[in-house]
Image (spheres, rainbow, N blue to C red):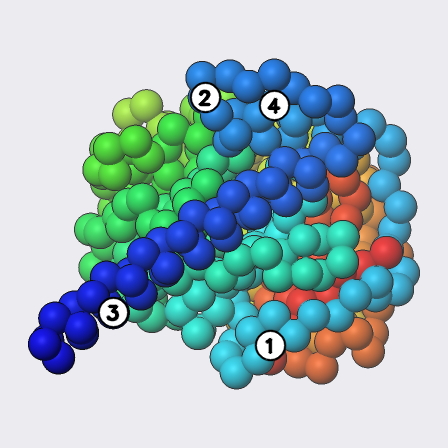
Amino acid sequence: IKDSMAEKYNEIHAIQEEAHRIKRSAELMAVANSLASPTAPDTPSTPGGESEMVSRRMSTDALTFGCQLPSTPKQTVLAHDRNEIHSLAHNCSGAMVLTGSDDRSLKLWDSRNGTKLAALEGAVKGVMCVGFSDDGKHVLGASNDFAVRIWSLKTSRVVHALTGHQNKIYCARFSPDSKSIYSGGYDRLIKLWDVHQGLVTQSINCSSSCNDAAMTPDGALLVSVHLDASVRLWDVRTAQLAHEISRVHKQPVTSVSLVPNNPHEIVTNSRDDSLQLLDIRMHTSIRSYQHQSYRNGVNWNRAAVSPDSQYLVAGAQDGSVVFWRRESGEHVTTLKHAHKSAVVCCSWANNDQLATVEREHSMVLWQ
């Protein structure tokens, strides 16, 4: 009788858990829809469901005016209270932001007020890089357990665990069409994956640990940055090296960002405490950015470019956030005192919101 009662209790508990999960997923998607375009009119349902509606609404939210330089923290959030934070990313509209941490979780936030929307579990070790798909359906997390995981935003569940790397993965991103993922890490490999099938389609030996990567909007070129201070350009179709740009940095390159209004320019960040504006057609440096207040503290420190391409921003080892003008190279301002430890990632969203994270637990939303 006791065994029968125990089985009944377990069945009831399982049903309650599933009901709670379904309710939470519905709430999350409702919030995502409202955040993606809070003033947009109702849109009829389509066969693709809620995620396609989110995607269509997000596509209308691109910034159409000049950026305002942030000056004060709007909200400081204790994002991961016991573990280091490594990564940060906005969705297409800027309405949501995602963080990844040594606590093995990804957390989804309302970027308007810093409210936590969901915690995504599944990684076995710390999460080094996070990102949204442009179609609004998925998020990813690259982990120190040698895997990239894809979560469904609709269900908050892992869809695929992409395994094949042989060491820590430092970066992963969705391709512009959301059909592929590219990843790179300490094993000196860059891998391209099919999102639908969860299988690797290309594997590239890149000769040095890959700290970050970015794909051009047409999906034709992949730019990777490395521990050996080089920037490498790869033909995505053939998976062959197109060009290597060396000697622009003297120390490991920690991030690469596309310039929104110029498809031929990228911005790199380095442990040599400089940022470089590079022309990927001419394979040369256009401009260098330095300042006495800027010291790059980690090998995965990610800078950002404003949506209107006017400004560059990077987080410093002492917790400062440093800004430069892209066109002139002039240092604009350094914002201090919002962070207490090294700032490791900046994300400047299409809605002109800047978010930054520091190693010791906190995220700042700026205004």
Location of the N terminus by quadrant is bottom left
Q: Nearer the viewer, mark 3 or mark 1?
A: 3
Q: Are marks 4 and 2 in contact (CB under 8 Å)?
A: no
Q: Nearer the viewer, mark 2 or mark 3?
A: 3
Q: How dense is the environment of label 1, judged by Cα within 10 Å: few (below 14), some, or many (20 and up)?
A: many
In the structure shown, which secondary structural element does the residue marked by tag 3 occupy?
helix
Q: How dense is the environment of label 2, judged by Cα within 10 Å: few (below 14), some, or many (20 and up)?
A: few
Point 37% across, 41% down: residue: 182
Check residue 9 in the rendering and tell me which mark sits there, or answer none. Answer: 3
Is 334 placed above or below 66 here? below
Residue that badge 4 annotates: 56
In the structure shown, which secondary structural element does the residue marked by tag 2 occupy?
loop
| Mark 2 → mark 1, Cα distance in angstroms | 37 Å
Nearer the observer, 203 or 175: 175
Residue that badge 2 annotates: 48
In the structure shown, which secondary structural element does the residue marked by tag 4 occupy?
helix
Q: How many marks?
A: 4
Nearer the observer, 11 or 225: 11
